Amino acid sequence: MDLTDYERAMLDGEHGRAKARAMELLVRYGEALGAERLVETNNVAGAFNASTPSVKHIVERGMDSVFSELNLDSDEVVEVPRMAASTCQLITGIDNDNWKLQGASEELIGMQREAERYLGARGINMFATCTPYQVGNVPVKGEHCAWMESSAVIYCNSVLGARTNVEGKESTGAAGLTGRIPYWGYHITENRYGSHLIELDTEVDDMMDWGLLGYFIGYAVEDEIPVLQQATHQPNLIKLKHFGAAAASSGGVEMYHIPGVTPEAPTLEDAFGGRKPREVIRYGKAERKATYEKLQSASDRKVDFIMLGCPHNSIEQMELIAHLLTDRTIHPDVQLWVHTPRAIKQVADRNGYCEVITKAGGVVMSDTCPAISRRLPPGVRVIATDSAKQAHYLPAIAKVDGWFGSVRQCIEAAVSGQWNGAV
């Protein structure tokens, strides 16, 4: 790879062993990808925390050992300095407040809190959310980033117009220490043009509609770049968040364009870079119905568990949930967990939304979600969720059956104990 003098100096160990090991990893990674050089980044979002039984043996050797092994793929334990790039922690495994309800041990929560102190001292901001863009990490158009988390990456590329590939624990660890990431994939302009045209032949308006559309598109284009011919209604952050998360779950979509909405596609021609689409795909009422049915893995309408907030809820979503639960009580056989970033939870608490949800019998959680933590209430057989992503993953991860629907349908199920949603 073609390295700058500064990058070569880091690789040669002139800036310490940690940066040398990070550069060794980035060079191996970049060469495997065919990247000719590295690119500067000052925006890294990764997974640095340690709160699972499988890493206990590493934690016992110290947090430098954890970072070296898990975030630098290094057998050598290096002393980890302050991050060179602005770096944040994504979603974690345990809610710092509700860990007992999740069934986590005191030992695990102790590990997590120790890790947070260690990471904070090195400049890693504990956002602890899959939606860093909702709590202050908002890169600008054209900014090179190094982000993990598929739903965050697709939002970063498509809605914000910043540039990142789906990175891993090791590459984000190395990027945080060096401020560098291989220049390949979606960092390069010519790789960001659309490949498939999606023609909408039905209304796509509310959050559930956008989740269904995203789920359909992921299956249809796999890891290519879809372009919506037009949006039937103006989408907001919430709708685009769920659309992208669904497309990244059913397929490997990391970027999309909506002319007049997303920043790199003022027109359809701009979205394709002047090229013709490789394929035109229609999405109408029949496709919507088939996608809805594909997301339903349950047959028993008696529900045990309602999960809202994947990706993590915005403050507007928290207000809606509180509104729908006002003066109501969740069925005694049902548990409701509502997930939101800790920073948004503070606002929701101040606004009284958390009190309404808790009074109704629900729990407001932060920092994690069932797909990441692999933790659900004991005895859960049937879930319901407003997230196409969670409906896709949880049945396989937790061996449960699932219903997918709107926020309102999920709240009605939480109160009645029965799923009555319909397409």
Image (tube, rainbow, N blue to C red):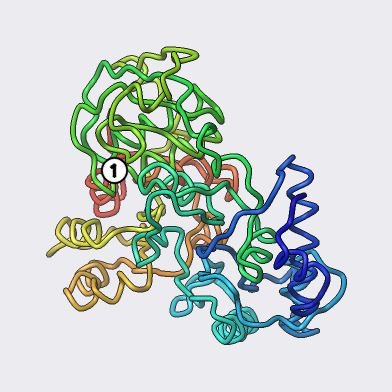
> Residue 62, image x and y in percent?
76, 85
> Residue 93, image x and y in percent?
56, 67
The answer to which image quadrant residue 123 occupies is: bottom right
Residue at position x 45%, y 54% from top? 143
Q: Which one is nearer the viewer's eye here, 263 or 355?
A: 263
Q: Is residue 374 left or right of residue 287?
A: right
- The quadrant of the rendering that contains the C terminus is top left
Number of residues whose C-alpha sits closer than 10 Å to that of mark 1, classed few (under 14), some (14–19) or many (20 or more): some
> Residue 334, image x and y in percent?
36, 57
Disc 1 target residue: 239
Residue at position x 48%, y 78% from top? 96
Residue found farthest to the front: 5
Please state which amino acid type lies under the numbered disc 1.
Lys
> Residue 141, image x and y in percent?
38, 50
Q: Which one is nearer the viewer's eye here, 69 or 211?
A: 69
Q: Is residue 149 left or right of residue 366?
A: right
Q: Which one is nearer the viewer's eye here, 176 or 330?
A: 176
| Label 1: element kind | helix
The answer to which image quadrant residue 197 occupies is: top left
